[in-house]
Image (cartoon, rainbow, N blue to C red):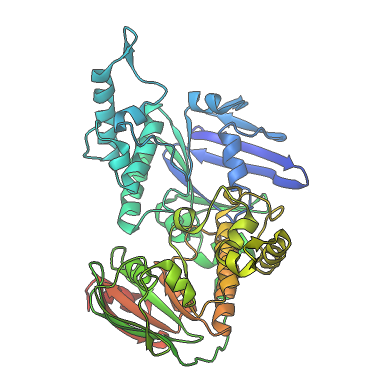
Amino acid sequence: MDSKAMLELNNITKTFPGVKALSNVSFTLNQNEIVGLAGENGAGKSTLIKILGGVYQPDGGTIELYGNRVRIADTHFGIAHGISIIYQELSLVPELSVAENLYLGALPNKAGKIDYDTLFRNSKEILRILGLDISPKTKVGGLGISIQQLVEIGKALARDAKILVMDEPTSSLGREDAERLFRTMKSLKEKGCGIIFISHRLEELFGVADRITVLRDGEVVDTRYSSDWTMDSLVFAMVNRKIDQFYPKRTISIGEKVLTVENLENKLINNVNFSVSAGEIVGIAGLVGSGRSELLKTIYGVNKVRKGRILLSGRECRIDSPEKALLHGIAMVPENRKVEGLILSSTVKENVVLSVLKKLAKYSFVSRKEISFSADRAIKYFEIRTPSGNQKVLKLSGGNQQKIIFARIAEIEPKILLLDEPTRGIDIGSKVDIYNKILDFAEKGAAILLVSSDLTEILGMADRVLVMKEGTMVAEMDIKDADSKLIMDYATGGR
């Protein structure tokens, strides 16, 4: 075993009833190293990190920590031996201070009381390491999501963790916040930590990881230094197909104008004008905070219109609520699916039919048979991977959760479809499925607005692209005339 190796997995195998989740997985993490872990949902990443965290026990294989063979019997063993798993869902207590969250479960005490002097002194040192200029007395609930993410990392440092496993830490972060996180990761690496970094954003793996390991169907496909991978080779290793096959091409005829926006204004957007026709996909690009999401929410009736008009098929409409938007055939896939798009504690079938219960009802009663029929049809068509329609949505992967939102929208048969980051935090295979479904909507005549921070996605899917900056539309171009550099020039004010 390499003298610098902190963690080594040898031929790890894990089987669940009817599923072999991991098969002979071998993996090494060295000191002063960030290893990226890539793979589709279902590739085995979650199972692997739960074995490291002591949640699952492997059926076969061995684990070595710092040169010694160990059995990670439970979560306490992992924490005691310097392993900290930072899951996508943060485990902070909003009502407590930063310091109390950092040392939750291990608060220093003196004579049976919390030793706040020691607590705040130790917390200041951790905040210094993290590069956070905030008071340790600040309540966590008042902090932005990026700062909360760093506080979660601080909890690991408070436990003297040497091995950090980070599961999709940037899924809810904008570009600037993600860059702050990456700087912190690199700083921790230089201080001797080893970090396993999981992300569906492949460009992030190239930007921060020293090596990248690819899992597919529970097996390690390959491990290489980041410089030895290309985007094409990495994607091919993950899904066994080339990157240019991601954006399915179809010839879709463009119809009459369905949505027209004239001089639209409120506190968040300023004098916005554009139109979208039936069968057309119009991408909206811009930096985080440029007004892209705010524009969609204004059209959907979440944000109130202060000035200007929204016309549907040439007729002016006053849309002041999502309910009214739905009545006019406008549907939206929100950016934050877990908060705005789904009822996580409900079942798949309940979420699918949520928007069409009135349509399914007869004499104020909803037939369970009708609900099951509609839901089963949608589950099959959208290829939602679930044991049954009665599965709780919170137990499904991000990609399958997003498909449920699309399935519900399909039941509405929308004329206008507003998509806000529709593939954020989703594995590559699910992205291709969703792209095909978006094209299905376009083929049926829906006018589609696509907001995405992934310029490759906009260039691959859209017919036209609009660029926003500081709440204003600054450019409009046919996709044939657009490229990433030109779009970013407009988005940053370079043109």
Kindly identify the residue that appears in the image at 35 percent across and 57 percent down: 174
**Horizontal and vertical percent position of residue 258:** 44, 86
| Picture quarter with the N terminus | top right
Residue 253 appears in which quarter of the rendering? bottom right
Return the residue nearer the eye: 140 or 489.
Answer: 140
Above or below for 478 versus 230: below
Question: As drawn, which residue projects farthest toward the top?
Answer: 111
Return the residue nearer the eye: 323 or 235.
Answer: 323
Q: Is residue 288 visible?
A: yes
Question: As drawn, which residue projects farthest toward the right?
Answer: 18
Kindly identify the residue that appears in the image at 50 percent across and 80 percent down: 415
Q: Is residue 280 left or right of residue 112?
A: right
Question: As drawn, which residue projects farthest toward the front?
Answer: 363
Residue 469 appears in which quarter of the rendering? bottom left
| Picture quarter with the C terminus | bottom left
**Horizontal and vertical percent position of residue 451:** 40, 71
Above or below for 223 versus 165: below
Please tell me how many numbered marks the rendered image carries. 0
Residue 204 appears in which quarter of the rendering? bottom left
Q: Is residue 456 visible?
A: no
**Horizontal and vertical percent position of residue 215:** 61, 52
Kindly identify the residue that appears in the image at 49 percent across and 23 percent down: 80
**Horizontal and vertical percent position of residue 113:** 32, 12
Above or below for 129 versus 296: above
Return the residue nearer the eye: 332 or 484.
Answer: 332
Q: Is residue 306 left or right of residue 61?
A: left
